[in-house]
Image (tube, coloured by chain):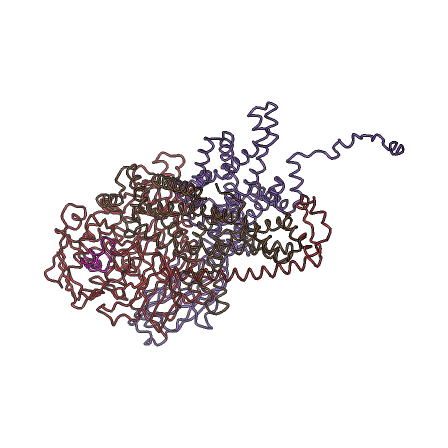
Amino acid sequence: MAEAALSFERVSVSRDVETISRPSLSYWQDAWVRLKANTRALVSLYIVIALGVFTLAGPLVWQVDPSAQDLDQISVAPGTDRAAVIVPRYQPWSGATARVEGPALQAQEMTAPTVSVDIVGEPTTQAVRIQWDAVPGASGYRVYRNIADPAPDDHLGLPLADILTADRVSFEDRLDLKPRYYFYSVVALDRNSMPAPVYNTVATVPTRVITAEEAVARGLADTPDALRLGDTVHLALHPFGTDYLGRDMLARLMHGARVSLFIGIVAPFVYVLIGILYGSAAGFAGGRTDQILMRFADFVVALPFLLFMILFRILFGIEGGDSGILPMMIAMAILAWPAAARLVRGQILQIREEGYVSASRLLGAKTNYLVLRHMIPNTMGVILVTLTFAVPSAIFTEAFLSFIGMGVAPPTPSWGSMCNEGIKTMLTHPHELVFPAVFISITVLAFNLLGDGLRDALDARMRSRE
Amino acid sequence: MISGRGHTPFAPRPLAAAGGTDTAAAKPQPAPPSSGADIFNKTAGRDLLLLGLAAIAGFVLLMAVLAWASEATGGASNDALDPVTGTVTVALSTEPPQLDSTRATDMVSGQVLGHTMEGLLRYDQFNRIVPGVAERWEIDSERAVFHLRADARWSEGSPVTAHDFAFAWRTALDPATASEYAFILYSIKNARAANIGELPLDAVGIRIPDDRTLVVELERPTAYFDKLMAFPTFFPIKESFYQATDGRYGADAEELLYNGPFAITRWVHGASLRMERNPHYWDQDRIRIQAIDHAYITSDINAVINLYKDGKIAMAGLSAETLEDALDRRWNLHRFVDGSVFYIGLNHRPERVTSNLNLRKAMQLVTDSAELVYKVIKLPGNLPGESLFPVWLKGVNGYFRQEYPAPRPVIDIDRAREHLARAKEELGYDEMPPLIFLTGDNPASNKQSEYFQEVYKSRLGLEVKIDRQIFKQRLAKMTAGDYDMVLAGWGPDYADPLTFGDLFASWNQNNRGRYANPVLDEWVAVAQSSLDPEERMQAFAAIQRILHDDVVILMNYERGSVYVRDPRLQGVVRRAVGTDPDFTNAWIEG
Amino acid sequence: MLRYTVKRLIQGVITVWFIATATFLAMHSIPGDPLTSDKAVSEEIRKNLEAKYGLDKPLGEQYVIYLANMLQGDFGISFSQENRSVNDIIREHFPVSATLGILAIAFAGLGGILFGALTALYRNRLPDIAIMFLVILGISVPSFVFAALGQLALVNLNDLFGTSVLPVAGWGTVLHMVAPSLVLGLGTMAFLTRLMRSSMLEIVNSDYVRTANSKGLPPTRIFLKHQLRNAILPVITVLGPSIAAITTGGFVVELVFAIPGLGRYFVEAVQQSDYTVIMGTTVFYGAFLVFMVIVVDLLYGLVDPRVRLE
């Protein structure tokens, strides 16, 4: 037993146990560590930063006026050939006439109803001029244009014009000419303006041209004299192509980002701020005031959001020249603050009952101190997460309003309105839809994933398992 | 992962589950590839599969139940053309607000009424005026006499009488009806006075000597009175039926009585409108199809084209953006001029800068309607605007515009800048204040207003502010004069140049820019009351000249459109004035 | 339970009154008026029209009349469709929107639960990745882009089969409902899938599942009775807000697929400044959503015994 007694020995108490081996992490430092471990959230964060750079610094690098119209390059896809030949300014063409003898006949009475067609002069994207021999007995002619050979099934294509005077035997085409194959067909019309069953076709590829004045106006040369007729110039470069008015897509995406992201970020910021003030006031006051304030918030929550967005959009009566961004943000703020207010109030009520707050109060902390030291920092996490998730829905709201024609006013570009325009051309010029849609999608996705990451990192209780 | 060990009850508890759940969040643990996990996944996967099948079955069942419950709203899913039943399926662009002919104002109502009703006269497939309910008529400078045919019948079998016309016209003029188109009846004696409440409705110059004769006293000689008779406001309404509907006349298929070639048999609001042949119509030989089924109501041009691609409708309008796809598909394309003229209206009120002639001249000299049509609108059929009087209007013998050509548009930026400098001097500005450009909220006006904004900025250095407003607010602003420029258009009501010619008369309520020119007013008066075609056309030529020289408006384009039609469907008439599209002469081949 | 229900209903009625008032005020502060029309009309005709719609009375009186009529379930006469009452319009077009909405919710709910469970089971394996790709699309692509692409896909599908498999637009038969309801439900389905997935993963680690495992319960039973049932609960809570999202999301789908629903009418009414229709539909939708939220809350109390309604 003595031995046993002897075996008792004073344990040397090492102070090391008490020392903190690792540097203590503040709430935010800890959150940052956890966020960094989440690859998706981190990548999303980088994307969000990149979008910020694209929006703010982009226009400094790519200094193209987003409203400048390059009418020589309308709806051009990225990577299209840009060579153009300098030609003189467009001169009206008087065309060709022929002497017509005899009365107009019925189609079956015409002896030689086939029209022989020729191209007059050099076909250019400025104008293609065609001429044909008069058909005896015709009362007029119909001119067609196709982009493929009509021959296999007599498919003449687009009816360009009806010429209802028998003596006119020429036509000038200026409609949206591109440097590609065109097949012009001419049909004689009989006495009742019915087409004869036979046609003749001529094929041509117009040369892409530009006048010296236009070249100067587009900034391709300093003075018209620096260019000689027949010179080849390269039209302005549009890396992302152009839209339906020949405006640079890249520049418009950058400026559209300013609108979309501005609405997407600032509007939630404003209404979350209102929500914080309102919610913390209610939560802190408690009792009857709290009840009344929250009942009012419930009313506002019950207003159908999109319907009222539309009503407000009209209500604010956007005047000429206004972009309509501000009214849209005000409307969003008016309708969306209660959600944030509810959340903050809930948090405040919860924190008020926490041990550390009671302890702090027992130690004599004043209200101001409690609010600043405990309440606000402890709700910041929730607020930040709310804010991040509010961005995608604000961007979607803007896009939706643009779709039904209640979005920002032209010519202000926004991703939503660009998408809406792009839908109309999605079969022929998909790039006009794809770029803005991809930008919206990436932004929305990035903010969603970042929100997930922040939620996991900031609040252990709200954390999902991944 | 943990649950995967469920079948081995005595397996040691994994450590991660004991205390490591917090860290598990940051770094997901790879599932141990134990066979247990696989078995569990398989079982659960099989359960899920069963549940999934059940869910799909439930979903389908739900759909069937709902479809059965909502059968009343059903539209057809027929094919575009049915040669056996003689049915043509097409889409309507919008729903007719109602089909009361005294109050109808829009094109779609006009289209439906043009098939279901018949006026005293009508347009045939060559756009000539031919007998309708009236078999003969005489019009002189004081009165018009119409002799109604004996076999014209309402769809319930009773004869169409002169009383039906008199009742409809008086109803339209009744101030209580508040018809927007009442003005079109003003060439009838005392019609205007009755419409503004100065005279009783009985004082309107309509007499009915017998059931089959209608005598109309004219306020002034009216050269185009016959053409008015084809307009919907002049269609008949049977009084007893009208009163029986208790204010709902024209709201639904049952609340209408028809005297035209077709009758509406089914009208599901917003969804479909079906017309079938009216067995009581007098001219049965003319009608070759049995039914026109407007199975879809949508203004979404992509939806319409997709329906055509799918073989569900027989006709579809195309946009410039869809032309290439249409050519690739080797569709049968047609074009036609729809009759409307579009322009930039200018505000002539003295307080606006646009009242300055030099500024207007400067703008005219840079407004290139050819560029607008060929590069921005890009749809064949649209013509560069040169005159308020469109090319299809008839003159004395041939076309008005061939007899009296419009002044040629000139684009001259240097001269424009000289005019602008003078305008600045006259107005006392160093820099022009921004111009307010009022536009609608549809895509076409967005595109055009953005184009023009850049044109005036780059060519004249003028700042233009686009004021985009929904329809009613744009009209309110136009009426109040709260704009400098406005994108506007005008469609014809009847096939006479006067439908355009009186638009800028100082007394015209639709002259919202308040242009006032006594010389123009005089020419309008001549055109209104003269019966001599030559004199009238000269008056219109003078008006055309004034509109150009005084730059009352900036011409943009004459609207046309391109559409695709099922090649088996023949005889459809597209026209500028009157029912469009008109299927009354159509037939299905094959 | 009954007391709670009654209390909630009374609150609901007050909320609807608030919505009605807000709508009335909003409508009457809008510049421009519904009586302006394309053809200018004379002063007399205008006065007649104003009298017909009661616009000649002072605002206070209009408000009282408006509330009184609404209490009787009368929303007035449409401005643009002069012979139809707003009640007719709602009665004819709301069932269409509701059908579409119910199907979309059903699709979103069933799809979300199934896909969520599937992704949780096959975490980080092919089914998970494939479904998450769909989810990402559903979350990040605007609905109108989806609707337009969906319609295009239908055209190509029908082209491929050489016959009309599914109609590309319109309304009426079962087949007409498939594509629009899938497009409409996709966004919500994506959201619910994510929710279901994380809730499943949480439950896998819960004590009762572990207990069930150690008791040796058959996997099927554990999966169905313990995991799935509990994981569904949080999904039901968000159904209320989802109904709101789907109702308004219906606007886009109705426009693109040419469906005669109330949403499309609302958008058209706004463009026509049709006061009575706008007010009627807004109040109707507002009331509908308020009571749907109450129903979902009550339902939740029934499904989850842990929730005490008070």
Residue furthest to the top:
A364
Residue at the image point whose x is 48% and y is 38% from the top: A337
Asked if residue B185 lies left or right of residue C153, the reply is left
| Quarter residue B358 falls in | top left
Q: Quadrant of the C terminus of chain B?
A: bottom left
Q: Is residue B95 above or below residue A41?
A: below
Identify whether A181 is placed above or below A291: below
Q: Colour of chain B?
A: red
Q: Position of residue B288 (x, y in %)?
A: 29, 71
Farthest right residue in view: A3
Q: A51 or B456: which is nearer to us?
A: A51
Q: Which chain is brown?
A: C
Q: Position of residue C140 (x, y in %)?
A: 54, 50
* Residue B562 at x, y percent in the picture: 39, 61
Residue reaching furthest left?
B209
Lateral position of residue B168 relative to residue C26, left or right = left
**Which stretch is magenta?**
B223-249
Question: In x, y percent, where is residue A227?
Answer: 52, 50
The correct choice, above or below, for B165 with respect to C291 in the image is below
Q: Which chain is purple?
A: A
Q: Quadrant of residue B356?
A: top left
Judge from the rendering whether residue A18 lies leftward or rightward of residue C280; answer left or right: right
Q: Nearer the viewer, residue B349 or C107?
A: C107
Q: Would you say residue C293 is visible in this rendering?
A: yes
Check residue C130 for magenta coloring: no
